[in-house]
Image: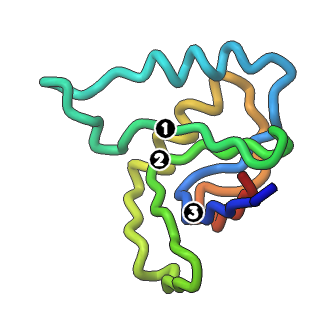
Amino acid sequence: MSVSHSVYAVYGVVVEPPGDCGPLHAALEAQTPAAGGAVPESGPVHLFTIGDSQHLILGTAYEALEPNEYRPVNTLPCDPAWGSALLTLTRPLGLRVHAGPAWLLVHDLN
């Protein structure tokens, strides 16, 4: 069996997995595009599940990193609206934020 690796830089927050993910999934699906169907300036919030759902990351921006690639963190873009969008989503759901908002390096096995 072959194992593949995925490595991302994700601007987001690490949240404690909720007992019921239904409200989180509903909130993510309910995100509305900006006028004319464009993506909101802060970008939509995406859910990243790491491992067997041990870690949940909500992210507004991400970049895939290739094997043997490096990227100085200070070259990754950062917009204050991203952090605001993440916290606006997590607070009403009562999600406990363990880390972030920040650029997070995410390594997952597929």
Give coordinates of residue 68: x percent, y percent: 57, 85
For image coordinates 74% across by 20% down, the residue present is: 21
Looking at marks 3 and 2 on the same chain, the residue that comes earlier in the sequence is marked by 3
For image coordinates 52% across by 38% down, the residue present is: 46
Residue 8 — which label? 3
Quadrant of the snapshot with the N terminus: bottom right
Where does label 2 land, which residue? 60
Q: Nearer the viewer, mark 3 or mark 2?
A: 3
Measured in 3D between alpha carbons, the distance from the residue under mark 1 to the one under mark 2, in whole angstroms, is 5 Å
Measured in 3D between alpha carbons, the distance from the residue under mark 3 to the one under mark 2, in whole angstroms, is 13 Å
Where does label 1 land, which residue? 45
**Callout 2 crowding tier (Cα within 10 Å): few <14, some 14–19, many ≥20:** many
Who is closer to the viewer here, 100 or 63? 63
- For badge 1, the amino acid type reads Val
Q: Nearer the viewer, mark 3 or mark 1?
A: 3
Looking at marks 3 and 1 on the same chain, the residue that comes earlier in the sequence is marked by 3
Give coordinates of residue 19: x percent, y percent: 86, 21
Colour convention of the picture: rainbow
Check disc 2 and report its element: helix, strand or loop. strand
Residue 79 — which label? none
